[in-house]
Every structure is written in C-alpha cells, then in structure tokens.
Image (spheres, rainbow, N blue to C red):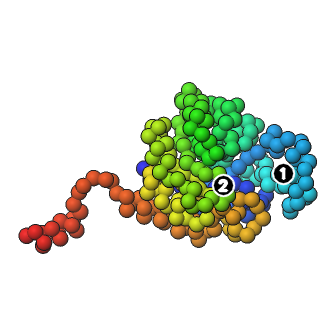
Amino acid sequence: MSVFITAEIGINHNGDLQLAKRLIDAAVVAGCDAVKFQKRTVDKVYTQEYLDSPRKSPWGETQRAQKEGLEFGKEEYDEIDRYCKEKGIEWFASAWDVDSQIFLRQYDLKYNKVASAMLTNDELLQEIASEGKYTFIATGMSTLDEIDHAVDIFEQAGCPYELMHCNSTYPMPVEDANLKLIRVLADIYKCKVGYSGHEAGTLVSTCAVAAGATSIERHITMDKTMYGSDQKASIEPYELCRLVKDIRDTEKIMGTGKKVLTPAEEEVKKKLRG
C-alpha cells in the first residue's frame, strides 16, 4: 500500500468557496489522495464569553465574527462535494463537535478525522467511532494514557483507525519532530501510524515516510502571507507538488527490505566475478 497523502485545506479557504476550489485543484495537480476541511458549530465549540471577546479580522471586530467568517455551511459543502467528485479526489473533514459530525454524515465520505484538540472529547470520539469509517486520529498534545483511552473507544466500537504522530505547534521547529515515535506508536498499538506535519518546508514530512509513516497530512495554502492562523505552517502548491513526488520516490527508495539482486546487478556480477 502506498502512503496516503492528504492536503489539509482546513480553514485556509478563509470562507471563500472559490479559494477552496483553487486549493482542491492544487491537491489534484500534485497527486494527493484527498483534501480535508474542518467543521465547527461555533456556539458549541466556543463559550459565549470567548465569542464576544475582541478580535480584528476581515469579518469584524469579535471572535464570533472571525469564527463564523471561516465556516462553510451546507451550500458550500454541497458544492465542495460535487467539485471533488468532478475532480476525482476524496474529501473529508475533522469535526470539532457532535453536531458537526452529524452534519458531515449527509455526504458519502470514506474517512473521518479526529483532530489533536479533540482527542480527549469522549462524546465526539464515540460519535465518530459509531460510524465505523476508517478514521485518522491525530495525537498532538497527547500523552500515551490519553491515546490509550481514545484507541480503546475505537477498539470497543470495532471502528478501523490509523494514528497520526503530530506536534501541535504552528509552525513546528524541525528539532521537535521526533519521528522515531512513529515506529514506537506502531509497536505499542499494532496499527498504522501516519504523520500530520505543521513544520516549514517538506523535508520532515518526507523523512517521516522513511521513518515508517503510512500517511502524510499537510496544511496547504495558495500564499503563506494570507490572513489566517494556519497559513505560515502550510505549504504552497509548488511545495506540495515536490512533497508528493519526494514521497513517491522515497517509497521506491525504501524498497522491500528483501536481499535480492536486480537484473542490472546480476550483469555487473557476471563481469566482476566471472
């Protein structure tokens, strides 16, 4: 099985459906397997006090205005669903509350995603696990005990899952990548382990494949200087193309681990050993 590559659009569309389509196009051109969004019910995820607090944004002067400005509703997701089908790419989303997870059920999505911030939200995890869809579980900010608990919910529900090693800093310093943990998690939980990256550039994500990652997720943007908290930790279309190519080359480079002589090496052997 080849590494599953997800281009995380998240909220980098800035509430603009046309920008979201451009990001989908970038993922298609690069050769990604899927694009991912984020879905929130603003009044369920955030407190009234927080939503009323000040924050300047293109949509107004409060946190509520900013959060609501970044949210797509049914009309936009209907078009995203149609557009992704037209372009031949899978899409899914990480829900940040139960209502959002239920909202996503109206689409025939193959995958679910547990965001690192939601790993300890038992109610949401149980709702996701009840669907039985293949679920990517990000493990940023989490202890092994917390991962144990989340995994147990999915195991009890009989829901297939894949952990994703992650460091939840934006952008992440490369020295914090700790890619050796990918193998450790795979050994502990006896499951596939991917990598969700927030670092600058593409080297760490490519190295993650060499370290055993079975999936890669990276935030993408059309321009890192755009408005948004995730833009600086994202990669632009040309970087995404390079990352996908490097991942596919790395898969070839890593090989099978079996000691075999290639036909070309057999010819050299005949010449040098007679």
Name the residue: 56% across, 38% down.
144
Q: Which mark identifies residue 68?
A: 1
Q: Amino acid at mark 1?
A: Glu
First reached walking from the N terminus: tag 2 or tag 1: 1
Q: Residues within 10 Å of mark 1 (few under 14, many from 20)?
A: some
Above or below residue 188? Residue 260 is: below
Determine the secondary structure under disc 1.
Answer: helix
- Residue displayed at 70% across by 63% down: 231
What mark, if any, has residue 114 been given in the picture?
Answer: none
Q: Residue at x 69, y 35 (%)?
A: 121
Seen as rendered, the residue at the extreme left is: 274
Q: Amino acid at mark 2?
A: Thr
Q: Residue furthest bottom?
A: 271
Which residue carries the number 2 mark? Answer: 169
Quadrant that contains the C terminus: bottom left
Q: Is residue 253 left or right of residue 85?
A: left
On the rendered structure, is 57 left or right of 258? right
- Is residue 126 among what the camera can see? yes
Residue 172: percent from left, percent from top:
62, 58
Label 2 close to label 1 by CB (< 8 Å): no
Report x, y in % for residue 169: 66, 55
